[in-house]
Amino acid sequence: MVKNKILFVSMPSIHVIRWIENLKETHHELYWFDILDKGKLNIPDNIHQFTNWKKRKLPYIKGEYFLSKKSSLLYERLQPLLERTANEVLEKIIIEIQPDVVHSFEMQSCSYPIIRTMSKYPDIKWLYSCWGNDLFYYRNFKEHNTKIRKVLNRIDFLHTDCIRDFEIAKQLGFKGQFLGVIPGGTGYRTEEIEKYKLPIHERKIILVKGYEHHFGRGLNVVKALELIKKELENYEVVVFGAHPKVIEYINEKSLNYTCFHRHGLTHEELIKLMGKSLLYIGNSISDGIPNTLLEAIVMGAFPIQSNPGGATSEIITDGENGFLIQQPENIEGIRENIIKAITNIPLVKSATVLNSVLAKERLDYEVNNKKLLAIYESIAQYR
């Protein structure tokens, strides 16, 4: 086996931690660059971390933040004069460790900021993991479209969490090697978490993802549930990951829902909660395949999920192993999906069986661990 020096470039994330942990017992040398300078990851000590790097060159100048928001291109030109940039720090890291592969997760925060340095070192292989909204949403804006194309033109290898984004990448000029689809969470130890799954007849929770921001439309789900209070008398509604707008609405309407804010549950607590839930509902105008959707599938909750760009339909067949929300802003349509689910328990049970097979074949840790390890072996062949 070829030994790679792999430099991961990302923001702190549970999904990145889980990805890196797949490699902790391999022969590869692993490094992590904290591109947002948020602090160390909770990963094994033998994985070197580059953190605490941001430093000012000049004292803060009034109006910098405003300029960064209103004229990002001008600010990017001035930024190297004001503070250390990710490009500068990455170049020093490259010179120090001589990586074989730079692997960036996400486009806007983790790949844009390093394009200048990566273009300066074209012989270093660049692997990019496309997640969520990277391409599907941001390609629609002229400034982002230009940056995305520039990055994709330099990228050597691409991994996605759905086929949709590979097709979009090709449309935007990607001509490198596609290394396949792997879930963002890299797979679940299905046998270990089986103990947290209640039988369908014992599940009385309707679990709602409470994101309400640029992309999330959790508030529409809450409003749909509000329309069917009587039908839900025997159920408990639990909203997790709730943004302030959702929490405020629930409080204003005196809705008897259990609510957890954005960081109110650990990952393990959420998994356990999904194992007690009859339905899981996630709604957004843009996403890849949400990790929370995959976790719901693994834990046996019947999924009702939006389908931006057809990504969700790669894993959910509408009416068979879940329901698709085709119009995230259509509250009545969401209400109808919820009613169809709670009044057709046989369908929910058959969906659970289908999703159990799907989980073992496509979402299991061992299955995806093999795919993940093969990615770096494939890259080694292209030296």
Image (spheres, grey):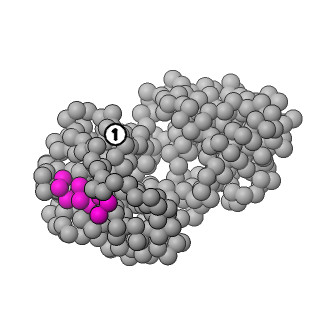
Counting from the top left corner in percent of width and height, residue 270 is at 54, 32
Counting from the top left corner in percent of width and height, residue 177 is at 30, 66
Residue 217, relative to residue 153: is it above or below?
above
Residue beneath disc 1: 39
> In the figure, is residue 364 to the left or right of 50?
right
- Which residue: 69% across, 57% down? 328
The quarter of the picture where residue 131 lies is: bottom left
Quadrant into which the C terminus falls: bottom left
Counting from the top left corner in percent of width and height, residue 185 is at 43, 44
Which of 4 and 187 lies nearest the eye of the viewer? 4
Stretch of the chain drawn in magenta: 81-93
- Which residue: 27% across, 68% down? 116
Can residue 170 be seen here? The reply is no
Main SS category, magenta section: helix
Q: Was residue 84 drawn as part of the magenta stretch in this picture? A: yes
Which of 137 and 338 lies nearest the eye of the viewer? 137
Can residue 254 be seen here? The reply is yes
Q: Is the residue marked by circle 1 packed among few (<14), some (14-19), or many (20+) residues within 10 Å?
A: some
